[in-house]
Image (cartoon, rainbow, N blue to C red):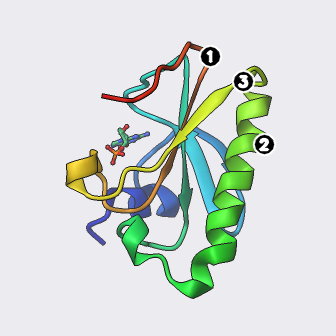
């Protein structure tokens, strides 16, 4: 298994986990870009957002639902940002989809 995030799912690489169920894992980002910055990933290996299949629609919804629940638990009621980078051009560096959840600082738009 070459995928870093599959190794985190398998417990082969440690991560500061916030949440786990049968479909997803959430853990703190190793290089936080905000006071709150965690990732929500599916346990299933999906390389990029472009590789989502029809059968993954409920899983994608579960990732978003989990993200907002955890964001609120992490004190981000006032606002937070979800980001999913797709392919290197957009900034993706780990090729197992992940939802970034960032909060507790002002955010600006558009992103750089
Ligand atoms: P992206 O650039 O969108 O593919 O985001 C990948 C994120 O993954 C990046 O913010 C840093 C984070 N990351 C990379 N390696 C590790 C790791 O080993 N542990 C944790 N917790 N986060 C990692």
Left or right position of 112 against 102: left
Ligand 1 shown in quarter: top left
Mark 3 in CB contact with mark 2 (< 8 angstroms): no
Q: Residue at x 65, y 71 (%)?
A: 59
Question: Residue 32 placed where, x, y %?
Answer: 43, 25
Which comes before the other along the chain, label 3 or label 2? 2
Question: Residue 6 placed where, x, y %?
Answer: 42, 64
Q: Nearer the viewer, residue 39 or 102?
A: 102
Vertical position of residue 91 compared to residue 6: above or below: above
- Regarding mark 1 in the picture, which secondary structure is present there? loop
Which residue is under mark 1?
104
Quadrant location, the C terminus:
top left
Callout 1 crowding tier (Cα within 10 Å): few <14, some 14–19, many ≥20: some
Q: Is mark 3 within 8 Å of ligand 1?
A: no
Vertical position of residue 1 compared to residue 78: above or below: below
Mark 3 in CB contact with mark 1 (< 8 angstroms): yes
Which comes before the other along the chain, label 2 or label 1? 2
Q: Is mark 2 within 8 Å of ligand 1?
A: no
Q: CA distance from mark 3 to mark 2?
A: 10 Å
Question: Residue 110 placed where, x, y %?
Answer: 40, 29
Callout 3 crowding tier (Cα within 10 Å): few <14, some 14–19, many ≥20: some
Q: Residue at x 57, y 33 (%)?
A: 81
Which comes before the other along the chain, label 3 or label 1? 3
Which residue is under mark 2?
69
Q: CA distance from mark 3 to mark 1?
A: 6 Å
Left or right position of 71 against 26: right
Which residue is under mark 3?
76
- Regarding mark 3 in the picture, which secondary structure is present there? loop
Q: Residue at x 69, y 74 (%)?
A: 58
Q: Nearer the viewer, residue 40 or 52?
A: 52
- Regarding mark 2 in the picture, which secondary structure is present there? helix
């Amino acid at each position: 298994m070459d995928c870093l995030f599959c190794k985190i799912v398998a417990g082969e690489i440690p991560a500061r986990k916030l949440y786990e169920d049968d479909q997803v894992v959430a853990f703190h980002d190793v290089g936080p870009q905000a006071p709150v910055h965690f990732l929500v990933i599916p346990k299933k290996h999906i390389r990029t957002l472009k590789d989502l299949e029809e059968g993954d629609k409920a899983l994608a919804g579960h990732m978003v639902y989990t993200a907002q629940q955890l964001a609120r638990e992490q004190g981000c009621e006032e606002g937070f940002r979800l980001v999913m980078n797709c392919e290197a051009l957009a900034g993706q560096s780990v090729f197992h989809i992940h939802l970034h959840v960032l909060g507790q600082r002002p955010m600006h738009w558009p992103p750089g």
